[in-house]
């Protein structure tokens, strides 16, 4: 593995570490609490449980795709969408009654969490359709393509 490959591996590991193992493991170990959180978005406990299981599947499969480079563009696009959707569903800073710029503010804390999810989505989209790829058109034409992140590069 070249130093460039190691840098790519470490940067991808940093991107997915939140999801695999930590968020995925949290969903497994604290399934009932996760379902309770999902019920903020949907009233049905069955649908909330399904959302958590779907989220677990997305976190595990897309993280592995990004780390291995197998269909990593699709994995990055799906995980970016997941980050954006979870931001809108669970980081609703606009619903917090105490959003303010100074002093203690639960609303501001949720706002920062919302922005972190959106920033992750942007970073992931840069893998899916950013520089070094053939863009959105190429991703749509060949959704399971790879960026070949660990291919030997000539200096």
Image (cartoon, helix red, strand yellow):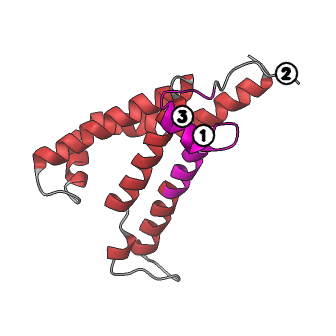
Front residue (pair 143, 31) = 143
Which disc is residue 127 wearing? 1
- Asked if labels 1 and 3 touch by Cβ distance under 8 angstroms, the answer is yes
Distance from disc 3 to disc 1, alpha carbons, whole Å, reads 6 Å
Q: Secondary structure at mark 3?
A: helix
Q: Indicate whether residue 120 is drawn in magenta.
A: yes
Front residue (pair 123, 142) = 142
Res. 6 in view: yes
Q: Secondary structure at mark 1?
A: helix
Which disc is residue 154 wearing? 2
Task: Tell me which residue sits at (55%, 46%) in the image.
Answer: 125
> Magenta stretch?
118-147
Distance from disc 1 to disc 2, alpha carbons, whole Å, reads 21 Å
Q: Quick check: 89 above or below 106?
A: above
Task: Tell me which residue sits at (62%, 29%) in the image.
Answer: 147
Could you tell me residue 131's position as x and y percent? 69, 42
Q: Secondary structure at mark 2?
A: loop
Badge 3, how many Cα within 10 Å: few under 14, some, many 20+?
many
Q: Quick check: 121 above or below 22?
A: below
- Which quadrant, please, contains the N terminus? top right
Residue assigned mark 3? 73
Task: Tell me which residue sits at (22%, 60%) in the image.
Answer: 40
Could you tell me residue 133's position as x and y percent? 65, 36
- Asked if labels 3 and 2 touch by Cβ distance under 8 angstroms, the answer is no
Task: Tell me which residue sits at (64%, 24%) in the image.
Answer: 148
Return the disc, 3 or 1, that comes first in the chain's sequence: 3
């Amino acid at each position: 593995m070249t130093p460039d490959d190691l840098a790519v591996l470490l940067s991808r590991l940093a991107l997915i570490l939140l999801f695999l193992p930590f968020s995925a493991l949290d969903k497994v170990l604290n399934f009932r609490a996760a379902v309770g959180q999902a019920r903020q978005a949907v009233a049905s406990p069955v649908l909330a449980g399904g959302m958590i299981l779907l989220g677990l599947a997305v976190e595990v499969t897309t993280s592995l795709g990004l780390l291995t480079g197998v269909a990593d563009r699709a994995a990055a696009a799906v995980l970016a969408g997941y980050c954006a959707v979870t931001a809108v569903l669970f980081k609703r800073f606009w619903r917090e009654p105490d959003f303010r710029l100074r002093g203690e503010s639960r609303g501001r804390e949720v706002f920062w969490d919302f922005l972190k999810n959106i920033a992750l989505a942007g970073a992931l989209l840069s893998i899916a359709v950013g520089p070094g790829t053939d863009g959105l058109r190429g991703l749509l034409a060949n959704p399971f393509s790879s960026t070949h992140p660990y291919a030997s590069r000539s200096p």
